[in-house]
Image (cartoon, rainbow, N blue to C red):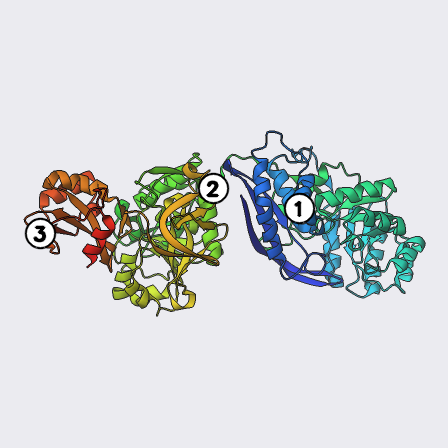
Amino acid sequence: MIDLRHKILEFKKPAKTSRGEYLYRKVWYITIYNPLDFSCYGRGEAAPLYDLSAEYTDDYEDILRDFCVKLEKPINSLFFAKQKTKDFSAFLLKESPELIDYPSILFAFETALYSCFVEWESEFSKGEKALDINGLIWMSDYDTMFESLRLKINEGYKCIKLKIGAIDFEKELDLIRYIRSKYSKEELEIRLDANGAFGKEEALDKLKQLSVFDIHSIEQPIRQGQWNALSEIILKSPIDIALDEELIGCNKTKDKIKLLDSLMPSYIVLKPSLHGGLYGTKEWIGLAEQRNIRWWITSALESNVGLTALAKWTASLNPKMPQGLGTGMLFKNNTEQYCYIKNAKLWYRPIIKDIYPWQKLSLNLRLDDISRGDNACDKSSQSTVVDKSSQNSIVNKSSQSAVVNISYENLSIYKGQIDSDLYQFLEQWWNDEACIKVQTSGSTGRAKQISIHKTKMILSAERTMSYLNCLDGQGKNVLLCMSLKYIGAKMMVIRSMVSNMRIIVRKASSRPLQNVNEKIDFTAIVPLQLQESLQSDRQKLEDIDCILVGGANVDSSIIKNVYKLKNRIFSTYGMTETISHIALRGLSESVYADYYRCLNGVAISQNDDKRLIIGTELKAEDYRDEMLITNDLCDIVEDGFLIKGRYDNVINTGGVKICPEEVEQIANQYFKVDTILTSCSDVSLGEKLILLIEDSQVDDVQKMLEIDIPDDFKNLIIAKLSKYHVPKVIYRVKKIPRLDSSKLDRLAVHNFSAD
């Protein structure tokens, strides 16, 4: 399975080049999951530069998504292959030759596959040896560049790279003059990067002025594409020329040979995200070394995901000179950092996989007397809060609720402080078992326990929150008001975790908003709760930004009422087997649709019976190798489906799936006659259970004579099944309709009851 998502990186301060400055940076992450074990995965980063990458267009994300779809099946086959490939670059280009023209995408797939299968092992990757790197001084005003330079030198860098061309050239000369007055070329190597800032007529004169300062090299003195002028500059320059931007878009071997033979630079500076991925970069290196052209690798403003892979790959090449690699310290909101700088060298901190992916998630819980439920130690106005000085300390403050961060490490200290069902679920979630046992509701047959991989639950939660644009939920509140016995409530906890939202817990009731005074941003409820909230807590309901309604069909009368609300309300389609919903239908005006729209990564089709077939990697382990054939009749539309009715005879009442045969077996024995369980439409429950008892004493086949429900029959049903299996009404009828085969005609019975 391949998962794709993007991230907007924010620079701590503007990153200036001669082409302009960056304030924000959009990157995409490709995650490849082992279909045999979802806890095994590899991640790669696609990080094109909008003003520099040859492949960057407005539809870049659509192109990237198309590659994910095209490559998913062949990549999945790698996990089942008897003979494992080691050259993933060749594999990718064989499957999709056009990747050669999309270096940032090729780099992402290459690094994801290598990290999933066989990473580059070296003394660096073991944390035993560092990489020599240059200290980078970004373009800025003179004072800022001077201060950055002073700090880099004090940190011990022996190689400094200055980006020039953004401020007055005389001031840049003053800065370099100062450096050389303090440090000789033996003590400090100076590299320059002009990013094409010089005009072709002035370039040689500026290079001559710079040469008196013993400059190691200068990258791309003039803008790319001016081969005649550049060839002359390289030939006559007193400073060695390194090419960078000139290599962009030159992806075919013959074109690379032509460029190197025509220009013969002293160095080439290689960025896999720009210069052909790992495959193209390695080819550049081979061709350069044949011509005695030296090289170094540099990053291209990737986040820590791309930087870490790039550093490990570079180390495997045994480079002989300082590289242009960093640790992503430019960004405010970078991903987890594994590379660090010590004594002006780049080190790698080996990942010790001592905890599993699901154990890395934590839960922000708003803790108050109500959320503690029946386990609250004190029913007064005291609330438990976390002491700021220690995440493991608890103090009490009067009349306030607090947000506590509960994690794998500190869960035990909250025993007795939080709702018992929530605590039990978190214990199951954070243990070492890869799968969690859940009870199905009976959508695909009799209810049973099945296993769901926790990593798939995370992916399902992320998929939903991404669809709803709720992944960044910092400071927002989730209301959990359903029973944690069911997958819907469990998934709400995981959605809260992956979005970093705060969760507020209320006991399941028909009026979930009754005791809620905080602003709620996201919740999931069943139709009965929706109906009651419309009647009793309408304003609170409308104040919630996004609501999911699941567990049962939503009656048309409720939909008519919901449509008038201004917030986003969706009906969900899914089941425990698909790890909660796979499609959403908008009910309120701003998102309204008369059909279910599929979430990303979900494929649907029909069988000959017009039953809906669901294809998704995110399903229970019991169904891992199967397509899920539902019992729902449907019409397929462009991006989803329209449910027409049920194929089987399972009755969904109030979100509980009832198998009629189970109730009928008990009823037949109790009443000593044939019975049949059917249903009719009900505003609150969706479907209301009706039991028909065959009684020849009824004088008319069209009559239905209601009788009281015997208490001992009711108790028998509750004892053997549950209270939800108890019929709401019992009728005596003269004859139960049957098919020619003598089997009960359930459709005729249902229509008879409805009439």
- Residue drawn at x 34%, y 37% is 449
Percent x, y of residue 366: 37, 53
User: 77 and 424: which one is in front?
Assistant: 77
Dot 2 falls on a residue whose secondary structure is helix
Q: Is residue 35 above or below residue 300?
A: above
Q: Residue furthest top?
A: 82
Amino acid, disc 1:
Ser
Amino acid, disc 3:
Ile
Q: CA distance from mark 2 to mark 3?
A: 51 Å
Residue carrying label 2 = 455
Give the mark, 2 or 3, whose residue is nearer the N terminus: 2
Could you tell whether 582 is left or right of 55 in the image? left
Q: Quadrant of the C terminus?
A: bottom left
Foreground mark, 2 or 3, reads 3
Q: Quadrant of residue 85?
A: top right
The dot on residue 707 is 3
Q: CA distance from mark 3 to mark 1?
A: 70 Å
Percent x, y of residue 436: 39, 38
Q: Residue furthest front?
A: 740
Percent x, y of residue 746: 23, 48
Q: CA distance from mark 1 to mark 2?
A: 29 Å
The dot on residue 96 is 1
Q: Are marks 1 and 2 in contact (CB under 8 Å)?
A: no
Q: Is residue 668 above or below residue 518?
A: above
Could you tell whether 75 is left or right of 645 in the image? right
Percent x, y of residue 151: 72, 52
Give the mark, 3 or 1, whose residue is nearer the N terminus: 1
Q: How many marks?
A: 3
Dot 1 falls on a residue whose secondary structure is loop
Instruction: Characterize the local packing of mark 1: few (<14), some (14-19) or many (20 or more) Cα atoms within 10 angstroms.
Output: some
